[in-house]
Image (tube, grey):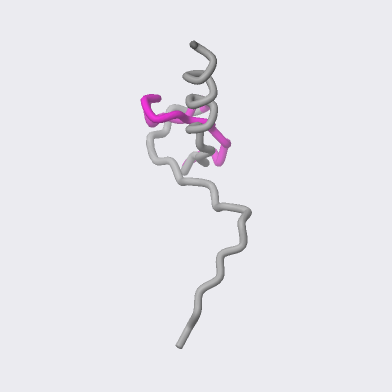
Amino acid sequence: MSEPSTKDSVKTAMTYICGECHHENEMRARDPIRCRECGYRIMYKKRTKRLVVFDAR
């Protein structure tokens, strides 16, 4: 029964980039918002690799 909860925690991990040192950090929902390298608190979400298309009219 503990296996689905571990899959959910791995699934919800997102990659963020530090605003100061540009180090990539993997964070989950309840993790503190802080860079693991320098301690900076401004993080940027990494851009998706999926194609994003908008219709301009």
**Residue sitting at x 45%, y 29%:** 28
By secondary structure, the bulk of the magenta-drawn segment is best described as loop
Q: Disc count in the image?
A: 0
Instruction: Give x and y (percent) for residue 33.
Output: 38, 31
Q: Which residues are magenta?
A: 20-37
Q: Report if residue 22 lies within the magenta region.
A: yes
Instruction: Give x and y (percent) for residue 4.
Output: 51, 20
**Residue sitting at x 46%, y 46%:** 44
**Relative to 5, is 33 on the left or the right?**
left
Vertical relation: 44 (above or below) 52: above
Vertical relation: 2 (above or below) 11: above
**Residue sitting at x 43%, y 27%:** 39
Foreground pick, 23 / 29: 29
Vertical relation: 36 (above or below) 1: below
Vertical relation: 43 (above or below) 29: below
**Residue sitting at x 55%, y 52%:** 47
**Picture quadrant where residue 40 is located:** top left
Instruction: Give x and y (percent) for residue 32.
Output: 37, 26
**Relative to 38, is 50 on the left or the right?**
right
